[in-house]
Image: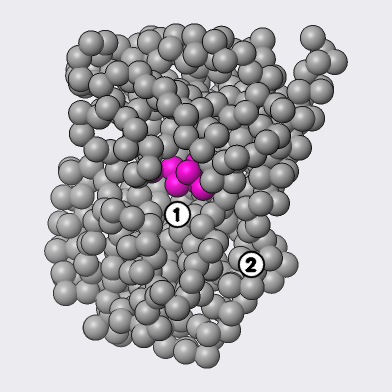
Amino acid sequence: MIKVVWICHFSNHEVQKHLPLVKKSPQYAPWISLLIQEFKENTDIELHIIAPFRWLKKDTYFQLDGIHYHFIKTGIPFVHRHWPAIFKFDFWTYFYLNRRKIRKTVEKIKPEIINLHGTENTYFSSAIFDLKKYPVLITIQGLFSFTEIMKNDYRYKVKLKTELRILKEFNNYGIRAKFLEDYISSKNPNSNFFWYKYPFKNDFNHSDFAVEKTYDVVFFAILSKDKGIEDLIKSIKIVKQTNNSISVKIIGTTNDSYFSFLKKLVRDLDLVSNIEFLGYLATQEEVHNWVSKAKICVLPTYNDIIPGTIVESLFLKIPVIAYAANGVVDFNFKEEIIRLVEVGNLEELARQITILLTDNELRVQLSIKAYQYAIENFDNALETKKLIDAYRKVIIEFSKIY
């Protein structure tokens, strides 16, 4: 049996039942929850998950279905709140308090390997610098290096510096797109790569979802400029010139100020009758039920690897239009699975939306190919086996060096 530590963050309703919370947290990082399902009762792995958690009253440990959970309270010690925005203690110290808790927890567990999930979340990824005496595998979730937002913000500089340092100082990476191999190698020529896809929900029962399409376009992701929500809204304005009744549902959350900005953009472009914000939906089932009613999904993301939005749409037999960004282009490596548009080309984005909404036969053809592609390329059990094999290889290579 291999004793493994994951350092990550996630939230779901099941774990929240066991946590002393100041208030409930939305679900996030669903790929971690899905991966946990694959590891439950796995006799080859003793899995310990160390996860910082917002709104936690105190550090909490519990065991559930063979998994050991170590949740860490973040923010001001002994107080149930975070550091005020004006006093950036965590960023000034590179999250010293979180790092110390994570290091002490790891030292008690004494794992054979550490799997850091992602380099982009500094509040826990920075802890890896204190744990170099252990074999480490870093599975890439996304790369902060490619983000275009808040470049003049101090927090951006801390996050970017942390990520680049990780890429330069550690050698073992789980990746799922060719551009990741090229980019990480440019920072660290000694990098070793293990091809591995995070799990996606793939057990859809299509009889549970509506057959009738009740609206045209769905967008479901975090509402941010990087995810292309502004481009989608602007492209809908173009589509409306020839399709006055186009209907769009937007699922996802953001901060209050950006949400106000998006609503104003919709008003200014005279799209109030066309675009509806559904906001945060409590369960994935509710999200997928809304998605299944759409004719097409549009995700003009500027920076992504294998977006869950796209994969879940493929499993739901919903044709997808996306920007040809980073790992997104890999979907069409052998044949056209999704419609790709040059990044930032609003006119072409609008044109492709119009084409798919008016050509029913093309839409059906794409949905069939998309579903078949998803079935053949996203096998959670197989990907979990690849991850465990990677653990073994990293442990063996580490023992040769030390």
230 up-or-down from 141: above or below: below
- Residue 29 in picture, x, y percent from top left: 44, 42
Name the chief secondary structure element in magenta.
Answer: helix
89 displayed left or right of 116:
left
By what rule are the colours in the image chosen?
one colour
> Which residue does the image show at 20% across and 34% down from the upper left?
23
> Which residue does the image show at 40% across and 52% down from the upper left?
227
- Residue 268 in picture, x, y percent from top left: 15, 63
Give the number of the disc on residue 375: 2
Q: Is residue 386 magenta?
A: no
Pair 2/1: label in front: 2
**Comes first in the chain, label 2 or label 1:** 1
Work out whether residue 213 or residue 349 is closer to the camera in this orientation and state it: 213
The quarter of the rendered structure image containing the N terminus is: top right
The quarter of the rendered structure image containing the C terminus is: top right
* Residue 109, quarter of picture: top right
Amino acid type for the residue under numbered disc 1:
Thr
Q: What stretch is highlighted in magenta?
A: 28-34
Check disc 1 and report the residue beneath it.
Answer: 301
Amino acid type for the residue under numbered disc 2:
Ile
> Mark 2: few, some, or many residues within 10 Å (few <14, many ≥20)?
few
